Image (cartoon, rainbow, N blue to C red):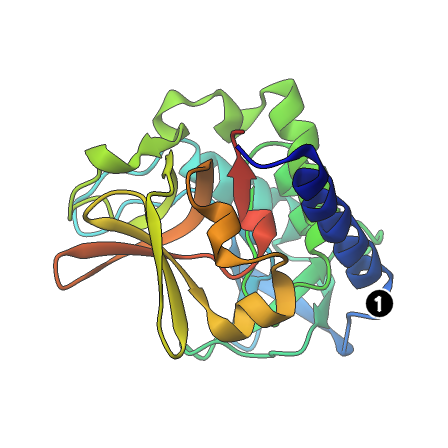
């Protein structure tokens, strides 16, 4: 067990960090464009056929290659279409303007000024996610998510999205997930820090992310129970989940 003083220091540091981050100017540029089509619950297509991936959220996945839709995936897509299709929206960019698929990365604001991501999160049709360096609105988006979680709306009322214990995960359980376990040990490498939840499941923090966003020492995590969210990937028989920011962790102790 960690001391009360250590826990207080960790929580105070995290609060100050997010307060400063929220107060910073986060939008690098804006432009307006018309939404022609909605692809899914977190991606729209503009009139010029450019795809836009909404910053800071992840919606349930529509089925591909014969796989069924995840629960609420169609509802999230339809709600986004109801809000944005045919609208001339404002795209607000952060530090990274495109992803490796060539999609624009932007916050999408409706003509009346409402933020589409916040609406979807409050209605429980998406989860908040952190993908550096575009994390300037994370505190605002987490607050919207917390409103839905507290009310048990949408994804927060679906048992299929409950955290999966690390020891139950298999190579087929890749993709966006909430996973749960006790951190058994950590290993420090030149660029990465690994935190083992089981012999085959590991949380990964880059040293760059640790230096920028995390507080304390890696040893502070060992022995603690945690729920982590993010994209689970299979690498040589091991499952890895990258944790860029502490906001993607919920400590159970």
Image vertical order of residue 168 relative to residue 184, above or below = above
Q: Which quadrant of the structure image shows residue 144?
A: top right
Residue at figure coordinates x 60%, y 79% from the top left: 97
Image vertical order of residue 78 relative to residue 163, above or below = below
| Residue 196 falls left or right of residue 97 | left
Q: In which quarter of the image is the C terminus?
A: top right
Q: Which quadrant of the structure image shows residue 85?
A: bottom right
Image vertical order of residue 88 relative to residue 161, above or below = below
Residue at figure coordinates x 44%, y 32% from the top left: 72
Residue 221 coordinates in the image, percent (x, y): 48, 47
Disc 1 element: loop
Name the residue that disc number 1 marks.
Answer: 24
Q: Which of 199 and 51 is in front in this view?
A: 199
Please indicate, yes or no, whether residue 132 appears anywhere in the rendered image. Answer: no
| Residue 119 falls left or right of residue 60 | right
Q: Nearer the viewer, residue 116 or 136?
A: 136
Q: Which of 137 and 51 is in front in this view?
A: 137
How many numbered markers are drawn?
1
Residue 122 coordinates in the image, percent (x, y): 67, 35
Residue 83 coordinates in the image, percent (x, y): 66, 46
Residue 42 coordinates in the image, percent (x, y): 52, 53
Image vertical order of residue 143 relative to residue 15, above or below = above
Q: How crowded is mark 1: few (under 14 residues within 10 Å), some or many (20 or more)?
A: few
| Residue 232 falls left or right of residue 4 | left
Q: Nearer the viewer, residue 77 or 101?
A: 101
- Residue reaching furthest to the left: 237
Please indicate, yes or no, whether residue 101 appears anywhere in the rendered image. Answer: yes
């Amino acid at each position: 067990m960690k001391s009360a003083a250590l826990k207080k220091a960790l929580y105070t540091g995290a609060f100050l960090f997010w307060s400063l981050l929220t107060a910073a100017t986060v939008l690098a540029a804006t432009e307006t464009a018309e939404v022609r089509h909605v692809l899914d619950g977190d991606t729209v297509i503009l009139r010029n056929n450019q795809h836009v991936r909404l910053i800071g959220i992840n919606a349930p996945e529509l089925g591909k290659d014969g796989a069924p839709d995840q629960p609420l995936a169609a509802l999230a897509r339809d709600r986004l279409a109801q809000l944005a299709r045919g609208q001339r929206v404002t795209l607000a960019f952060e530090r990274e303007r495109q992803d490796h698929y060539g999609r624009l990365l932007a916050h999408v604001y409706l003509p009346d000024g409402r933020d589409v991501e916040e609406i979807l999160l409050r209605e429980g049709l998406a989860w908040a996610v952190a993908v550096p360096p575009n994390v300037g609105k994370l505190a605002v988006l987490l607050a919207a998510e917390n409103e839905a979680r507290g009310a048990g709306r949408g994804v927060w009322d679906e048992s299929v999205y409950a955290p999966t214990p690390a020891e139950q995960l298999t190579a087929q359980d890749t993709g966006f997930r909430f996973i749960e376990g006790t951190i058994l040990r950590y290993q420090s490498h030149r660029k990465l820090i690994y935190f083992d939840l089981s012999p085959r499941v590991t949380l990964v923090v880059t040293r760059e992310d640790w230096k920028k966003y995390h507080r304390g020492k890696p040893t502070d995590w060992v022995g603690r129970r945690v729920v982590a969210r993010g994209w689970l990937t299979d690498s040589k028989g091991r499952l890895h989940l990258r944790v860029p920011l502490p906001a993607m962790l919920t400590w159970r102790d």
